[in-house]
Amino acid sequence: MYHFNKILAIAFFIFLTGCSIGGEKKIKIFSVEEPRQKLNYPMPTPLQMEEIYWHIITSENAEEVFRKLEEAGIDPVLFGITDKDYQVLARNFAQIRQKLQETNNLLEEYKKYYEGTEENKQ
Amino acid sequence: MAIAILLITGIAGAGVYVMKLRADNATLKANQQKLETAITEQNKVLEQQKKDFTAILESNKKLNTLINTFKKDLEDLDKRFTKKNRDIGKLAIERTKAIERIINGGGKNAARCIELASGAEHTEAELKATLKSEINPECPSLANPNYVPFQ
């Protein structure tokens, strides 16, 4: 009887503590960095320039130029600039084009740096 | 009896001490792991910083080259108007038709340069151009990447 009680007591002890054998499972908290969504704007649509025609008028050919315009059904009026202003206009246009190129280039470089190229993504 | 109590207390103390050592060991192991992870992460950060630095340098170099090309293009444009004391006005009086043709050709080329600067694709002819007669003289560096000007 004495042994039976002992065994009973041990069994009771195991019954009570059995679930704790092996310990509590620890909760693991992961922090996964979710990368910021890419803006993915398409690059601006390239410009399509329309053609213009430059007329050169001198005191010699002025009448001929206006006559030809009238014959072609175009209003005989011209908006003129001098040869010096033409140079300035050419320079201004070159500068606008360069600024456009520079801005587009900067945009590409930023995109490449912050969003990476196809090779860097892998 | 006293010896037995002393013995039991000694054994219990030893047990507690061993458990403490085990706990310390576990903590040290965890610390070691954390340190190793931190070192790996630091190395990764350093590597990324190196890559970023190289990319920034490369990008700066590219933009500087581009800006130098701009300067050269503008100088070339000025030269075309003033080369050898050229006076475009006088030339236009003397050879009106020829200059009109040149000016209109230049206008077309300049318009194409703007299209390219805004991101238009190069044509095959533009890419293949290697001779001076084939290039767009308004912006050769932009329009004809394969053209190497004779120095």
Image (spheres, coloured by chain):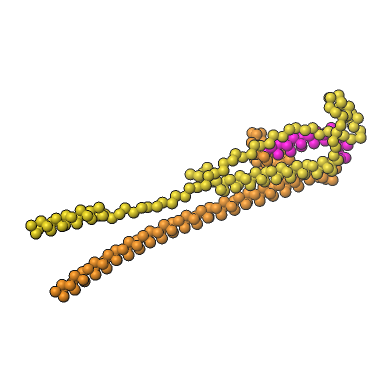
Chain colours: A yellow, B orange
What residue is rendered at 15% in x and 57% in y? A9
Taking B57 as reference, is B108 above or below it?
above
The residue positioned farthest toward the left in the image shown: A1
Instruction: Give the residues in magenta.
Output: B89-116
Observer-nearest of B111 and B77: B111
Percent coordinates x, y for residue A3 in the rendering: 9, 58
Percent coordinates x, y for residue A70 in the rendering: 87, 26
Q: Is residue A41 magenta?
A: no
Observer-nearest of B147 and B62: B62
Please identify the quarter of the rendering in which residue A79 is found.
top right
Report the predominant secondary structure element of the magenta stretch.
helix
Please identify the quarter of the rendering in which residue A59 is found.
top right
Q: Is residue B114 magenta?
A: yes
Is residue B25 rendered to the left or right of residue A7? right
Taking A71 as reference, is B1 above or below it?
below
Asked whether residue B150 appears in the rendered view, the answer is no
Observer-nearest of A37 and A96: A37
What residue is rendered at 84% in x and 43% in y? A84
Quadrant in which the N terminus of chain B appears: bottom left
